[in-house]
Amino acid sequence: KAGVTQTPRYLIKTRGQQVTLSCSPISGHRSVSWYQQTPGQGLQFLFEYFSETQRNKGNFPGRFSGRQFSNSRSEMNVSTLELGDSALYLCASSFSPGATGGSLHFGNGTRLTVT
Amino acid sequence: EDQVTQSPEALRLQEGESSSLNCSYTVSGLRGLFWYRQDPGKGPEFLFTLYSAGEEKEKERLKATLTKKESFLHITAPKPEDSATYLCAVQAGGGSNYKLTFGKGTLLTVNP
């Protein structure tokens, strides 16, 4: 059974540009959550999607957005990139929203570098 | 606001030298406390769930315990392959916000 797949693995962007990251959940999983991981802040929750609807949102500016498609694949978009957006972006999937932490399956992340 | 603090930030052990990692937390209504292992370039891998004070879970050389304010991850006779970052997270119960709040992790290095 394939795990959570995130593409691309690495991205280098310039300040002011925008970027789109993709996440394919485990087959059968319909909930997708996104997290940002930085050395200074650790892992921070961005948002969660289920049935193409955003169910929860963390404390990030509106430049961070996401969406989910009917096949449960999800994308997140960051507009007007800032240097501080450099981070590892992790996606996690589960069968349903509000899953306990033990039911989350994480992908290996997309490493975004903003120069 | 839920908070998780892990200590130490980094820990170096010799193979076979047992030690403990600490996770202190404040949360409104604990739904669960979770331990993960993260290897370089990988996403977090689930290890344990603890639900209530006094609970303990074991897996190979790892043992997780929980009190009302903190959790410990005990590592007995570690091996070099136990080297990783260990993350602690809490999940509040009730309401509709199920997000995990993570600590910043403890980087464990086990030298042969």
Image (cartoon, coloured by chain):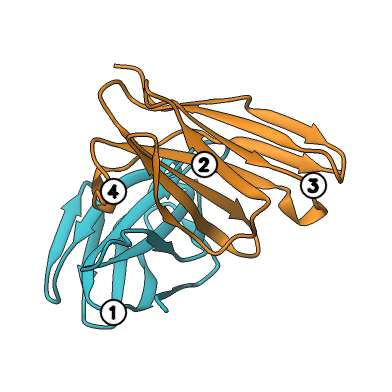
Tell me the chain of label 1: B
Amino acid type of the residue tagged 4 in the rendering: Leu
Residue A64 locus on image (x, y percent):
63, 49
| Residue that label 4 marks | B47
Depth check, front residue: A66 or A37: A66
Q: In the image, are marks 3 and 1 on the same chain?
A: no
Q: Residues within 10 Å of mark 4 (few under 14, many from 20)?
A: some
Q: Colour of chain B?
A: cyan
Q: Colour of chain A?
A: orange
On the question of residue B8 being in view, the answer is yes
Q: CA distance from mark 4 to mark 3?
A: 37 Å
Residue A95 locus on image (x, y percent):
24, 35
Tell me the chain of label 4: B
Whether tag 2 and tag 4 are in contact, CB under 8 A, the answer is no
Q: CA distance from mark 2 to mark 4?
A: 18 Å
Image height of B28 relative to A76, above or below: below
Q: In the image, are marks 2 and 1 on the same chain?
A: no
Foreground label between 1 and 4: 1
| Residue that label 2 marks | A90
Whether tag 1 and tag 4 are in contact, CB under 8 A, the answer is no
| Residue that label 1 marks | B28
Depth check, front residue: B73 or A50: A50
Amino acid type of the residue tagged 2 in the rendering: Leu
- Of pointers 1 and 4, the one earlier in the residue sequence: 1
Foreground label between 3 and 2: 3
Tell me where residue B10 sits by quadrant: bottom right
